Image: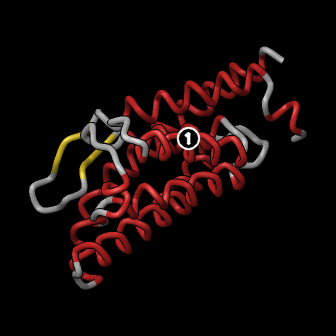
């Protein structure tokens, strides 16, 4: 994808909408009593962003979202913001988003496929995100890996699988619509 295509009005609009969706979806969350992590719609939107955009565009969107939060806009989960959030127990998830979802976007390929999108989200996006979350919790809370898995991974697996399916389904529908317009 050349520079002109990457930054066409159409693509910039999709990227802006994805950043806005990331910001809004972070507010759709609820806490679990035994972990600092929250169940959130953000992972659904991260997957959707990867399914709709190229890897470079996905990285730019996620980096933009993270920078908005670092500079103080309350766009992180629960309406939080600041560099302290990145360095806190759930900061590893946020950092992992910038690694996981451009890879998901890269691996989705050119074929619009619900099965492929879902498989990549579950087998690539979720594990990379969890690795970031586990590392963040270990470093900030000074806990062992088992405790981190209990707090950052196990309670979230069923919901993340459902959100991955929802993102794959929506991504397939939207990509078919976007491709009709060309």
Asked if one can make out residue 149 in the rendered structure from this viewpoint, the answer is no
In the picture, residue 157 is in which quadrant? bottom left
Q: Which residue is mark 1?
A: 64
Question: What residue lies at 38% left-to-right and 45% top-to-bottom?
Answer: 162
Q: Position of residue 10 (x, y in %)?
A: 74, 20
Q: Which is nearer the eye, 114 or 147?
A: 147
Is the N terminus in the top left, top right, bottom left or bottom right quadrant?
Answer: top right
- Left or right placement of residue 157 versus residue 142 in this view: right
How many numbered badges does the structure rendering display? Answer: 1
Image position of 141 with respect to 79: above or below: below
Provide the secondary structure element on which disc 1 rests.
helix
In the picture, residue 17 is in which quadrant? top right
Residue lying furthest top: 181
Question: What residue lies at 34% left-to-right and 38% top-to-bottom?
Answer: 26
Image position of 153 with respect to 21: above or below: below
Image position of 91 with respect to 116: above or below: below
């Amino acid at each position: 994808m050349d520079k002109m295509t990457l930054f066409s009005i159409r693509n910039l609009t999709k990227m802006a909408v994805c950043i806005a969706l990331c910001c809004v979806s972070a507010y759709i969350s609820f806490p679990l009593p035994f972990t600092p992590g929250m169940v959130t719609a953000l992972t659904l939107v991260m997957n959707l962003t990867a399914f709709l955009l190229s890897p470079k565009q996905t990285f730019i969107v996620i980096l933009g979202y993270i920078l908005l939060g670092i500079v103080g806009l309350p766009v992180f989960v629960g309406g939080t913001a600041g560099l302290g959030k990145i360095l806190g127990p759930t900061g590893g998830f946020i950092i992992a988003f910038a690694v996981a979802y451009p890879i998901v976007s890269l691996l989705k390929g050119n074929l619009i496929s619900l099965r492929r999108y879902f498989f990549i989200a579950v087998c690539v996006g979720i594990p990379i995100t969890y690795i970031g979350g586990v590392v963040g919790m270990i470093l900030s809370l000074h806990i062992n890996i088992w405790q981190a898995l209990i707090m950052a991974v196990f309670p979230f697996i069923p919901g993340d699988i459902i959100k991955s399916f929802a993102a794959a389904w929506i991504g397939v529908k939207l990509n078919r619509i976007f491709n009709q317009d060309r």
